[in-house]
């Protein structure tokens, strides 16, 4: 190989090495720039998320007088690591509509949900007070209490309407005494085809007690999910016979009834109510 050829090859090798080194340097520079852009983007997104969360908190706090229970639970979730709810009163321990409601709430709330059932089937309003069942409720430390009222049991016990109203108010006071920051939601039970018109010695059926309880709640400006009323309205609108949504006793819900009741409960969870009596 001539000296000129050797020198040319040497120059080419130097040029090749230079190109490689330049490419590596350029690639590293580009990577650093991309990482810097990504870091700045992440910081911006975090700031935006923090601003959004802060604005959401402000919106919740300013809307407490007219906030859905579902948004209230989200608000609680932004303040605490865990949100606790309790179903309380004249309910069965294995109540399918409660399971459906728990699943719905869990899907809607990002925070961990702790759900409790304090079931006292056939308990009347006086029994809940006299046996001090609120102590068991207090142990669950709920942020929201869904208190199913007791018109069926009060009617069967032959309690007077005045006493039934008074006992209901005593139950609310007892709950707020042990759980001052809990939001109490009264819930009316599903209607019954067999108990309507089945009068006690006072010539009152369960609807008389139910109407008295709802009136007591409304007079005190407490919150009520009047599912009994909504249920009957839904059946009338859809042309469904009440008996077709209940089991053979004419009182407990069958599969179709459970679907209707739980759906109505979900709708109630999204309606705006006064939540200022809570935390």
Image: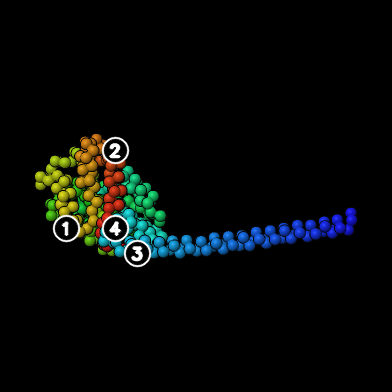
Q: Which residue is mark 1?
A: 219
Cα separation, mark 4 vs mark 2, equals 30 Å
Disc 3 crowd, CA 10 A, few/some/many (<14, 14-19, 20+) = few
Q: Which residue is mark 2?
A: 256
**Which residue is at a point 32% across and 58% down the rendered structure image?**
72
Q: Nearer the viewer, residue 242 or 163?
A: 242
Mark 3 vs mark 2: give the one in front. 3
Instruction: Give the x, y percent position of residue 244.
Output: 24, 35
Instruction: Give the x, y percent position of residue 168.
Output: 19, 56
Cα separation, mark 2 vs mark 1, equals 33 Å
Whether the residues at callouts 2 and 1 have beta carbons within 8 Å, the answer is no
Q: Please identify the quarter of the rendering in which residue 248 is found.
A: top left
Q: The residue tagged with tag 3: helix, strand or loop?
A: helix
Return the disc, 3 or 4, that comes first in the chain's sequence. Answer: 3
Mark 4 vs mark 2: give the one in front. 4
Whether the residues at callouts 3 and 2 have beta carbons within 8 Å, the answer is no
For the N terminus, give its image quadrant. Answer: bottom right
Return the disc, 4 or 2, that comes first in the chain's sequence. Answer: 4
Disc 4 crowd, CA 10 A, few/some/many (<14, 14-19, 20+) = many
Q: Which numbered circle lies on residue 67?
A: 4
Cα separation, mark 3 vs mark 2, equals 40 Å
**Which residue is at a point 39% across and 58% down the rendered structure image?**
82
Return the disc, 2 or 1, that comes first in the chain's sequence. Answer: 1
For the C terminus, give its image quadrant. Answer: bottom left
Q: Which residue is mark 3?
A: 58
Q: Which numbered circle lies on residue 180?
A: none
Residue lying at the far right of the rendered structure: 2
Q: The residue tagged with tag 4: helix, strand or loop?
A: strand
Instruction: Give the x, y percent position of residue 4.
Output: 86, 58
């Amino acid at each position: 190989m001539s000296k000129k050829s050797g020198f040319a090859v040497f120059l080419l090798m130097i040029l090749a090495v230079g190109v490689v080194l330049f490419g590596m340097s350029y690639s590293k520079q580009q990577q650093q720039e991309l990482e810097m852009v990504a870091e700045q983007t992440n910081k911006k997104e975090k700031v935006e998320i923090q601003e959004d969360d802060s604005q959401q908190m402000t919106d919740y706090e300013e809307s407490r007088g007219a906030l859905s229970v579902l948004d209230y639970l989200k608000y609680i979730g932004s303040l605490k690591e865990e949100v606790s709810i309790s179903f309380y009163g004249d309910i069965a321990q294995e109540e399918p509509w409660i399971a459906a409601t728990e699943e719905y709430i869990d899907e809607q709330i990002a925070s961990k949900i702790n759900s409790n059932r304090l079931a006292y089937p056939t308990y009347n309003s006086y029994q809940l007070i006299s046996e001090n069942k609120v102590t068991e409720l207090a142990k669950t430390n709920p942020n929201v209490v869904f208190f199913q009222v007791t018109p069926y049991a009060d009617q069967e016990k032959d309690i007077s309407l005045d006493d039934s109203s008074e006992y209901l108010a005593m139950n609310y006071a007892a709950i707020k005494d042990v759980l001052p920051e809990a939001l109490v939601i009264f819930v009316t039970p599903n209607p019954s085809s067999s108990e309507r018109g089945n009068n006690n010695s006072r010539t009152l059926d369960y609807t008389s007690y139910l109407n008295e309880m709802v009136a007591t709640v409304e007079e005190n400006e407490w919150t009520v999910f009047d599912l009994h009323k909504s249920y009957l309205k839904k059946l009338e609108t859809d042309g469904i016979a009440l008996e077709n949504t209940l089991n053979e006793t004419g009182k407990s819900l069958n599969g179709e009834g459970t679907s209707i009741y739980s759906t109505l409960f979900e709708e109630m969870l999204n309606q705006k109510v006064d939540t200022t009596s809570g935390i």
